[in-house]
Amino acid sequence: MAKTIGLIGYPIRYSISPYFQQAALDYYNLDVCYDAWEVRPKDLEVTVSQLRDFQYLGANVTIPYKESVIPLLDELDEWATMVGAVNTIVRNKNRLVGFNTDSYGFLEALYQDGNFDPEDKRVVILGAGGAASAVSFALAQKKVKSITVINRTLGRAQKLVGRLEHFIASQAIVSGRSAIKLNALPWQVLSSHETLSYCHLLVNCTAMGTRYGSLEGDFPLGSDVIPAGIMVYDLVYNPPLTPLLQQAQEAGASILGGLPMLVYQGAASLQLWTGADAPVSFMMGKAKEALQSLP
């Protein structure tokens, strides 16, 4: 009997995950179908519950459900528990286990495609949701010098920083000879030249600039406040050159888009579902093909 994997999100009309994930499953001749499920909030609980049926291997989870899906699962692995966000669900018999492969995907892309080592660097993160949590916890493990979280709702940024403080203390993580410096700031500070003056890495974890989304064409800050020479990493993958990355290029910054992270996290998810080594290069090529074919 054919198995099924789903992608749970809203909206997901233009997601390319089904294209490169199905290609990878077909690459190994697995009798598995990867479907996109555009799930409204009122239907989330029912959709997740059906994953316990024998035909399902699990699911990916994307915006806006990476945090809200957690109470619907039976258990989380240790990393997903610390991060507080899930992007991969695996059915283990009739139990649903949550994982977070976003952290791995983020770092893999940063090292391999961005050629950037974050250790002892100052980082500014835009957003405080599930993606920002995965990114900030991953960077904390890599002993950055500082992490500043900037969000429209300051309380959410403060909450994320509080969890980071606990994580760093519990893991006894230090950068060099000192503790990692943490800060939460309101969105308004992005208009100031001072905000990024000592920054080495800026990561956009919001949906700003996403093609076909409600924030299409938007960017959080302009070239006039982006320092030359820093790395600007936008997790948005469509369009490949987002409005933020255009501003960063104008400012003379290095840039990295979100497509490599999408593929690396997807490859890690594939291994969790199937146990097979993901054909990463093949998946990357298929992801690029899918992105180019979108209207």
Image (cartoon, rainbow, N blue to C red):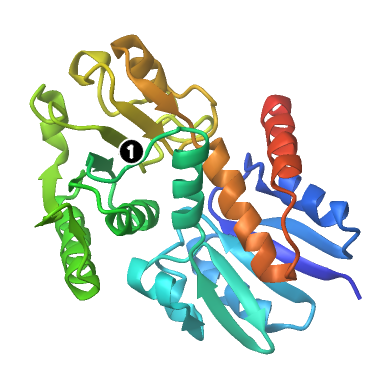
Residue depicted at x 61% and y 80%: 49
Instruction: Label 1, secondary structure: give it.
Output: strand
Residue closest to the far front: 177
Image position of 220 (left or right of 238): left
* Residue 84: % across, % down: 36, 68
The quarter of the rendered structure image containing the N terminus is bottom right
Image position of 142 (left or right of 24): left
* Residue 167: % across, % down: 23, 69
Query: What amino acid is labelled 1 in the image?
Result: Val
Image position of 83 (left or right of 140): right
Image position of 129 (left or right of 60): left
* Residue 283: % across, % down: 72, 43
Q: Which one is nearer the viewer's eye here, 219 or 223?
A: 223
* Residue 202: % across, % down: 29, 34
Residue depicted at x 17% and y 38%: 187
31 shown above or below 142: below
User: Looking at the rendering, which quadrant does residue 129 occupy?
Assistant: bottom left
Residue depicted at x 28% and y 29%: 220
Q: On the image, numbered disc 1 is attached to which residue?
A: 203
Residue depicted at x 59% and y 74%: 48
170 shown above or below 86: below
User: Looking at the rendering, which quadrant does residue 260 occupy?
Assistant: top right
